[in-house]
Amino acid sequence: MENYYQKEIETASQEQIREWQNERLVKTVHHVWENNEFYRKRMQEKGVTPEDIKSVDDLYKLPFTTKDDLREQYPYGLLSKPLDECVRIQSTSGTTGRRVVAFYTQHDIDLWDDCCARAIVAAGGTKDDVCHVSYGYGLFTGGPGLNGGSHKVGCLTLPMSSGNTERQIQFMTDLGSTILCCTPSYAAYLAESIIEKGLRDKIKLKAGIFGAEAWTEEMRQDIQDKLGIKAYDIYGLTEISGPGVSFECSEQTGMHINEDHFIAEIIDPNTGEVLPEGAKGELVFTSITKEAFPLLRYRTRDICILSRKPCSCGRTHVKMTKPLGRSDDMLIVKGVNVFPSQIEMVLLQKGLTSNYQIIVDREKTTDSIEVKVEMTPALFHDTMTTLEAKEQEITDALKSVLGIYAKISIVEPKSIVRSEGKAVRVIDKRNLYKNN
């Protein structure tokens, strides 16, 4: 089965990939024009008809779709198949505003399973593996996506869901889990718990497939060292399908996009101009094989770079970098653009943990930023370095990276609440004042 995923599709020539994309884009545009009033009106507003879209070269003519569009059209406004042909709904994990929902036909589910199966195979998975899925199940796409992909590969699948860490570790040791699928923050928590219990030599993990939140290379290395695994990134959005839109291979230098199902563009987030390969900008996706909920030129708000540099794994599909930040999550503090990933990079480079929290506040008209990070055992036993000296070292390093002062507070171990799903990294108290 792994040969099918790797050789038949993922090593196709650029000409074959473009041929698939051209054919499927034209078919999708006709499909939404005929079955979706929202897209038909949007295209008419731009003076575009399906006949104007003959290939990927015409993609720029189509309108963008945003998360605000999805919220405004909730629940059925972007549905492009009759409801009685849909078999599932998934939803985002957001807690504010209208939820974003996505619909799936059985055909859509089958293709999504294929995409996630490719990610598992790229991480070395085969039918002989035990795939331990600790992403949340239910409306969140993480659990269902990797669960379906694991079945497709033929792995023995443990649908653990998130939480109940004691049971997670028991099953991991008793059943010999070899591939762990969860958020990176929960992987870090599991690693911490396994080491504390003295069970490091009892686990048989060889790989981890981690996504659903941003994580740095430093955090990757920390997880790999603690669990003795190779950690692979996976990317996806509920709006597009879920995890499996792209995934890392053994080279770990970016995520291969499943180009037979999705067309990727990089645009200037301010102007919407399409940027050339290698430029940093906002990632935009067009679904070209989905039936129930195909999105045209969906603005992800993730900032990244695309590259077609040949990959040593043999896959020919374009690679995207890890998201380098989000155009809508970026913090503006004292007029400076700050991304949480920049702060995490410095903390891990300075030997601290991935258990941290960023608190942004405002005193009168002046913004302030505080970073709380937990002490490590090494720092606790280091009699040569005081906490004050370490805090000053990190303060200086952050100022060099960010260009502004950030207060650093090294706190006691276990004092920052652990996450069994997506970690809460940022508390922006300025928003609290704004909403009151």
Image (tube, rainbow, N blue to C red):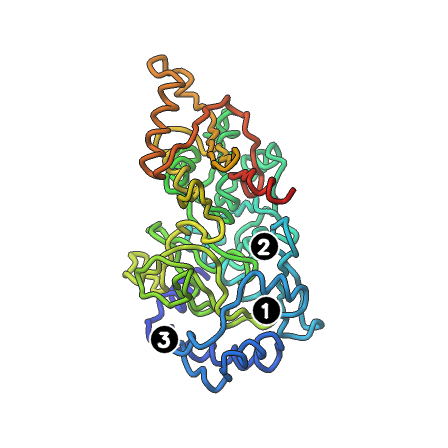
Q: Residue at x 46, y 31 (%)?
A: 371
Residue underneath mark 3: 16
- The answer for how far apart the CA atoms under marks 2 and 3 are is 30 Å
The foreground one among 399 and 261 is 399
Residue at 57 percent across and 49 percent down: it is 157
Q: Earlier in the sequence, mark 2 or mark 3?
A: 3
Q: Circles 2 and 1: CB distance less than 8 Å?
A: no
Q: Is residue 421 visible?
A: yes
Image position, residue 16 (x, y; %):
36, 75
Give the mark nearer the N terminus: 2 vs 1. 2
SS state under label 2? loop
The crowd level at tag 2 (other Cα within 10 Å; few <14, some 14-19, many 20+) is many
Give the camera-side residue of 184 and 299: 299
Q: Please tell me whether mark 2 or mark 1 is closer to you in this view.
A: 1
Identify the amino acid type marked 3. Answer: Gln
For label 3, the crowd category at 10 Å Cα-Cα, with few meaning under 14, some 14 to 19 and many 20 or more, is few
Which residue shows up at 60% across the image and 82% down it? 34
Q: Which residue is mark 2?
A: 141
Distance in Å between CA atoms under marks 3 and 1: 25 Å
Could you say where residue 415 lies in the image, as x and y percent from the top left? Answer: 55, 25
Check disc 1 and report the residue beneath it. 293
Q: Which residue is rendered at x = 49% and y = 50% of the image?
A: 128
